Image (cartoon, grey):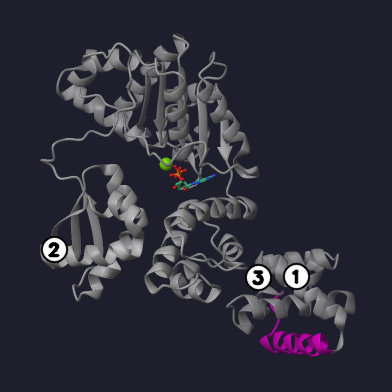
Amino acid sequence: MTQEKWGQLRQQLLKTVGQNNYKTWIEPLEFSDLKDGVATFHVPTNFIGNYVSQNFADLILYELNSTGASVQRVSFRVPANATAIPAKPVFKSAKAKPQTSESGLTAAPLDARFTFDSFVVGKPNELAHAAARRAAEGGPVTFNPLFLYGGVGLGKTHLMHAIAWELRARHPELNVLYLSAEQFMYRFVQALRERKMMDFKELFRSVDVLMVDDVQFIAGKDSTQEEFFHTFNALVDQNKQIIISADRAPGEIKDLEDRVKSRLQCGLVVDLHPTDYELRLGILQTKVENYRTMYPELNISDGVLEFLAHRISTNVRVLEGALTRLYAFASLVGREITMELTQDCLADVLRASERKISVEEIQRKVSDHYNIRLSDMIGPKRVRTYARPRQVAMYLCKQLTSRSLPEIGRRFGGRDHTTVMHGVKRIEELKQQDGQIAEDIELLRRALEA
Ligand code: ADP
Ligand code: MG
């Protein structure tokens, strides 16, 4: 791979991504080197790097490899000696405090995509969203801290950035400091090392809104916790808003001092629940709107989004990644996004998020459906009222799980595998003759696969 090759490749990319995307995202890339299967590009800012990495990396990778280069990964980085184009610091002060730069304290940059406008609200996150909106108004502090928590990829960082953007727009006079707990620790250690603790303390005590992301990170880090605790108290005493996120509730964070825990709990604690189908579909639809401007020539067939929302339920990041890959791929091969293309292109993602249905789940659903007790279904009774549902459950276990007949038998009160086999056969026959059974099974299957 050479500079010249990259020059040619860029022309190819121009055709695929269109003039606008090309100008904004591809042109600024400078090929640096190719080592150990990693092609590195220099980018002028982290923002561009992140964006390209999320939206065009697959495409670039594909193009590189199609020229015969052997590239496993592409990486984007701001060169160390770049004439620093600093990411806009969040820390803003009307008075432009000089100690800000002296103590090296700039806030983490905000992602331009993480705004309230782009946040899709559904049942699982409506409370967190409402609380975030309230905090973003910047009015009198009513709950302190606001503590947002939830699993990976459910939108905590997105909401935090959205609050910071909004506060910045509405109240440019406020000092809003957003950073991750890791950065907090890093700054703290640096201040210790450089004997600048006074600056550090003064700076943190002079913010109007302090936002700390992923606070679980400071668990077990005693002196950082101590400093965080003091900063926290000082700000609360001054009635300054604090907004915290974590991957779990305050009480559940291990190795966090009790006094810190109880401080964190005394404001408003809200969680982001795992996404549901409707929310996932909503997020996908919003993303597709964006892609429509990016790839106006690409059509997406009915049913693809529903399929993805059903099948990828782990986290939103994976969901977004899947859609990005799909668009990049479809635009490469110049085809419409159909179900077939989706299954081809996302085979690995789909396999990884395949929902594993358990024997227990099937037993529970089936006994509920026929209104019998679970113990009777698994137990020895042979009357038809129990035996038939039992056979239905066995049949579904055979169909929907990868358990063998002996394994299934064991889970049905230690029955022999021939009993299971007989049961499965019986249901197969009945399905042909008895409409009711066929319907029951279809219903149950759908419920289990939902
Ligand atoms: P977390 O910090 O909770 O791990 P992020 O905020 O980084 O998760 O979200 C992961 C990705 O999913 C981001 O790209 C974010 O924009 C997106 N995302 C999550 N929830 C939503 C939502 N409700 N609406 C739109 N995008 C979302
Ligand atoms: Mg996060």
Question: Disc 1 on helix, strand or loop?
Answer: helix
Please state the extent of the stretch shown in magenta in the rendering.
413-432
Question: Disc 3 on helix, strand or loop?
Answer: helix
Cα distance between the residues tagged 3 and 1: 13 Å
Circle nearer the N terminus (3, 1): 3
Give the number of the disc on residue 359. Answer: 3
Cα distance between the residues tagged 2 and 3: 48 Å
Query: Badge 1 local density, few (<14 within 10 Å), some, or many (20+)?
Result: some
Please identify, in this view, whether the residue under mark 1 or under mark 2 is nearer the observer.
2
Q: Residue at x 17, y 63 (%)?
A: 7
Give the number of the disc on residue 302. Answer: none
Q: Are marks 1 and 2 in contact (CB under 8 Å)?
A: no
Q: Are marks 3 and 1 in contact (CB under 8 Å)?
A: no
- In the rendered image, which residue does mark 2 sit on? 35
Give the number of the disc on residue 444. Answer: 1
- The answer to whether 3 is drawn above or below residue 172 in the figure is below
